[in-house]
Image (spheres, coloured by chain):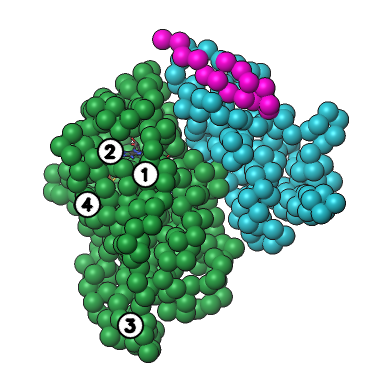
Chain colours: A cyan, B green
Amino acid sequence: MTQILNLTINGTSQDIPIDDPRATLLDVLRERIGLTGTKKGCDRGQCGACTVLIDGRRINSCLALALSYDGAEITTVEGLAQGELLHPVQAAFIEADGFQCGYCTPGQIMSAVALIAEGEAGLDPERVREGMSGNLCRCAAYAGITEAVLKATRAMNREDAA
Amino acid sequence: MNLFEYTRAETLDAAMSAATEDGAILAGGTNLLDLMKIGVVNPTRLIDITRLPLHDIEEHDGGLRIGAMVRNADLARHPVILSRFPAVAEALLSGASAQLRNAASTGGNIMQQTRCSYFQDPLSPCNRREPGSGCAAIGGETRNHAVLGWTEACIATHPSDLCVALAAYDAVVEITGPDGLREVPMESFHPLPDANGTGPAPLQSGEIITHIRLPDSGGMARNARYVKLRERTSFAFAIVSAAAALEIQDGRIVQARLALGGVAARPWRARTAEKALADQSPTEEAFARAADLALEGAAPSGDNRAKITLARRIAIRALTRAAAGTPDRLPALPASVFEGDCNG
Ligand SMILES: Cc1cc2nc3c(=O)[nH]c(=O)nc-3n(C[C@H](O)[C@H](O)[C@H](O)COP(=O)(O)OP(=O)(O)OC[C@H]3O[C@@H](n4cnc5c(N)ncnc54)[C@H](O)[C@@H]3O)c2cc1C
Ligand code: SF4
Ligand code: FES
Ligand code: FES
């Protein structure tokens, strides 16, 4: 039985017919919508490569049954930049060398966007590392990732103040 | 993953009538989908309970009543949890990752399956997965396995951090089913194995956890901690863990709570140790004696004898930290053994 899944993905509402209820949100994003920025690493909640925001909260899209999120607003890494203008977290990852191969990077960036919005880590590197521990990096770019999150936090604090 | 029919329950009654043998309840999905992907559970129907009105945390006689769908992240941030049940917050924040805690529900956390790697391998004999088939873990890799309350039928541990803290605080599980309501203490909700198998299922066909109740924590609110030993400091299950809460007046312990994680098929409430601590001074000797009592009867279920020593040390450390007082803000690394405040 085909079920209709409504998702607002990066601001655009879409009705997606789902024939096979087994589809995860990750599979829907990559294979149905063609948004391949969100990566499949482990497919089991262990690496964070598939991190997206659902109604503003970060989750692992590989363990999210798509039909269960009917009506949700999803933000993927493709939804962060405004045209050519990078999101401050994206810019900070480039400035701080927060990656090597880049496979984990979309997940890292989405996780960092949520971490900064949660507001609990602030500028404490230990809290940033703990808050990012759901995102593994096989290239071990961790030092650059922490630096990028701190840089982005400072940049976004300045934006808020301005 | 096998094919299933998906339905979204709009009412508790609809969820109950659907949650029979071949159906499975879907909450956050972080354990259920994981196990379905590797073929360990194969329900033919999924009943999505995420839209049921079980998302609230209510204050209740000085304690809390927590809806089964309250997400782990929201529970850990709740002001009453932070101020009166801080070991619950610390246990939650030491578990999984920020992403998983945003999806994982209170009911799902309690109902999550063991991380026994033989349970997770459909080709291995496992009495828990397939009653009567045997236990492949015996003689195998037993770092995750029990040192208390195990039998030859099953040596698995329950992996939840949350449940350990809930058991220490006398939490009660509220269950609704075809025969009405019933309540079970968290401490005895998960069955221990017997000689023949893994014990009776915690829920009957059609039953759903609706709420968890936490009674008033009284004078223990600011002397409570959770400590968790892991193979890495974050995003790892416990090898052993302990939740401790104390009420201290005029330098004496009025009441004590101690529960251990990673040691048995349920959170292990150490009642003899608690009794022995009553009316004692909160000293290292008293805590060492209590930890000995907590591990009384412990036996390795394989090459995991070290867990007995580790659990004893973690119990002492949790009690020592609880006596020192809950910090106003939880540490950057919740429940980490790397904290410079004591040398238990
Ligand atoms: C990589 C990884 C690391 C993790 N690390 C930790 C850790 O360190 N510590 C820890 O404690 N946990 C850890 N977890 C486990 C995690 O906490 C659980 O997966 C989660 O709590 C399950 O909640 P859920 O809502 O997603 O449950 P689901 O996956 O939806 O359900 C789990 C089970 O509970 C049943 N169920 C759900 N709700 C109810 C209800 N209301 N009534 C009756 N039955 C119900 C389901 O049918 C299913 O059998 C980890 C998980 C992963 C994937
Ligand atoms: S320890 Fe229990 S869960 Fe693990 S293989 Fe043996 S019976 Fe199965
Ligand atoms: S792909 Fe989802 S956590 Fe690894
Ligand atoms: S940059 Fe290669 S995995 Fe992180």
**Mark number, residue B197:** none
Determine whether the beta carbon of the residue marked 3 sits less than 8 angstroms from the nearest atom of ligand 1: no
- Residue B301 is situated, as x and y percent measured from the top left of the image, at 27, 56
- Residue B270 is situated, as x and y percent measured from the top left of the image, at 27, 68
- Residue A53 is situated, as x and y percent measured from the top left of the image, at 61, 36
Label 2: how many residues lie within 10 Å, few (<14), some (14-19) or many (20+)? many
In this figure, which residue is indicated by the disc labeled 3? B253
Same chain shared by disc 3 and disc 1: yes
The kind of residue tagged 1 is Ala
In this figure, which residue is indicated by the disc labeled 2? B208
Along the line of sight, the residue nearer the viewer: A50 or B77: B77
Q: Is residue A63 left or right of residue B268?
A: right
Residue at 83%, 28% in the rendered image? A83
The kind of residue tagged 3 is Ile
Could you tell me which chain the residue with mark 1 belongs to?
Answer: B
Could you tell me which chain the residue with mark 2 belongs to?
Answer: B
Same chain shared by disc 3 and disc 2: yes
Report how far apart the C-alphas of labels 4 and 3 lie in the structure.
28 Å
